[in-house]
Image (cartoon, rainbow, N blue to C red):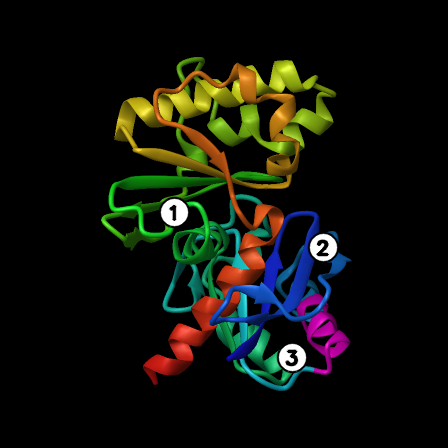
């Protein structure tokens, strides 16, 4: 089954048509900068632009960086506060003219990796960390997803919230070297390891493409592997989430 997957991030809204059986992109990825300010109306319009780019009329899956319950945004850490309480599925569906199914962006990225990528057939505790404008997490235990964990908001030993200290946006804004940033990110992973003792960390988001630049600064006992889909995990997982929702009807 082919479904359009869309990954809504703080800097870009990216989409591609996905073969949900194989996890492969059927088309080239298409990206539009996230509108600023990223109000619900503006984001919905940009998502609709992505849909129109592909001349798509079928179901759409979207990953969005907030806690989502039954299609409704419950938080707005890295997006406009106006999203809180908004039914994203209704808003995006009305704007695009398609049936849009929305879930947390890190959760859908994790879904892709645990189905086709690094976490495939792994029966232990796996934590996927997506690093971009913020830090997102997806936790799989014995093959089951614990949704909406949002562990980029935990506080580190220095008293600073993790994503305000070690997100990729912080690296760029503060012009940190990969060594400086890698040590910051390592402190986050060590905190996560102390709390959960995972068997494996899977790293996604934009920084996954530069793993060789900071890998040597990571000292966790659990291995850290880059996502098989790298920065495309959100697109693939969003399409898979939509497929599951369609099949459940």
Disc 3: which residue: 96
CB under 8 Å between discs 1 and 2: no
Residue at 74%, 78% (x, y): give it.
52
Disc 2: which residue: 34
| 138 lies above or below 20 | above
Q: First in sequence, mark 3 or 1: give its number.
A: 3
**Which structural element holds mark 1?**
loop
Residue at 47%, 26% (x, y): give it.
161
Q: Which residue range is magenta in the image?
A: 46-55
| 189 lies above or below 112 | above
Q: Label 2 to label 3, Cα distance in Å? A: 16 Å
Disc 1: which residue: 119
Residue 87 visible in the picture: no
| 62 lies above or below 51 | above
The location of residue 203, given as percent across then percent down, is 50, 37
**Which structural element holds mark 3?**
helix
Q: Label 3 to label 1, Cα distance in Å? A: 33 Å
């Amino acid at each position: 089954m082919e479904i359009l997957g869309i990954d809504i991030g703080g800097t870009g809204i990216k989409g591609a048509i996905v073969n949900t059986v194989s996890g492969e992109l059927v088309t080239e990825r298409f990206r539009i900068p996230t509108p600023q300010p990223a109000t619900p109306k503006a984001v919905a319009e940009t998502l609709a632009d992505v849909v129109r780019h592909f001349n798509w009329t079928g179901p759409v899956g979207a990953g969005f960086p907030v806690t989502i319950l039954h299609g409704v945004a419950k938080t707005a850490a890295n997006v406009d506060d106006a999203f809180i309480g908004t039914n994203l599925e209704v808003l995006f569906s009305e704007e695009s003219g398609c049936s849009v199914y929305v879930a947390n962006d890190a959760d859908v990225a994790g879904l892709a990796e645990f189905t086709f990528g690094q976490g495939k057939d792994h029966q232990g505790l796996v934590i996927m960390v997506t690093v971009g404008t913020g830090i997102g997490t997806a936790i799989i235990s014995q093959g089951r997803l614990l949704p909406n964990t949002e562990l980029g908001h935990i506080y580190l030993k220095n008293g600073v919230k993790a994503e305000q200290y070690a997100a990729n946006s912080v690296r760029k804004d503060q012009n940190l070297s990969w060594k400086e940033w890698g040590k910051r990110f390592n402190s986050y992973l060590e905190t996560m390891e102390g709390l959960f003792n995972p068997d494996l960390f899977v790293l996604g988001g934009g920084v996954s493409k530069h793993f060789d630049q900071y890998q040597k600064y990571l000292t966790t006992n659990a291995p850290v592997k880059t996502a098989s889909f790298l920065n495309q995990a959100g697109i693939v997982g969003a399409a898979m989430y939509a497929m599951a929702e369609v099949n459940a009807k």
